[in-house]
Image (cartoon, rainbow, N blue to C red):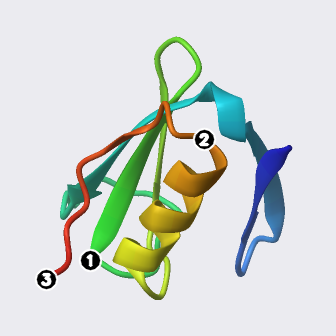
Amino acid sequence: MSLNLILYPIQNIFYIGINDIKEITKSNTIISSPAASFDRIEIKYGKFQEMIISPKDKFEFAKYLTKLNPKIKNNITED
């Protein structure tokens, strides 16, 4: 099972294995990323990879991922 990220407007597709995700953390970094917002989360996966995204509901998204893979360290809390 994988997390499929489709990035607009460039429409690149990234596949991240759910079992490869190590940690989810809030991020408001200004580093360029595919996230359309500054209210972001950082997904750490693989050995040293990371992806910054901005799901509509960070808390529910993180909760869903940790339901699929309980080994994910979830640092996202309800605001």
The amino acid type of the residue labelled 2 equals: Asn
In terms of sequence position, does the residue under pointer 2 or pointer 3 come before the other?
2
Q: Residue at x 76, y 71 (%)?
A: 10
In terms of sequence position, does the residue under pointer 1 or pointer 2 come before the other?
1
Q: Residue at x 18, y 64 (%)?
A: 28
The amino acid type of the residue labelled 1 equals: Asp
Q: Quadrant of residue 65?
A: bottom right
The amino acid type of the residue labelled 3 equals: Asp
Q: Nearer the viewer, residue 56 or 64?
A: 64
Residue 17 appears at what percent x and percent y?
Answer: 75, 36
User: Which SS class for mark 1?
Assistant: loop
The reply to whether callout 2 and callout 3 are in contact (CB within 8 Å) is no
In terms of sequence position, does the residue under pointer 1 or pointer 3 come before the other?
1
Instruction: Between label 1 and label 2, give the one nearer the viewer.
Output: 2
Residue 69 - label: 2
Q: CA distance from mark 2 to mark 3?
A: 23 Å
Residue that badge 1 annotates? 39
Residue 79 - label: 3
Q: CA distance from mark 1 to mark 3?
A: 12 Å
Residue 62 appears at what percent x and percent y?
Answer: 44, 62
Residue 73 - label: none
Q: From the viewer's perspective, is 46 left or right of 22?
A: right
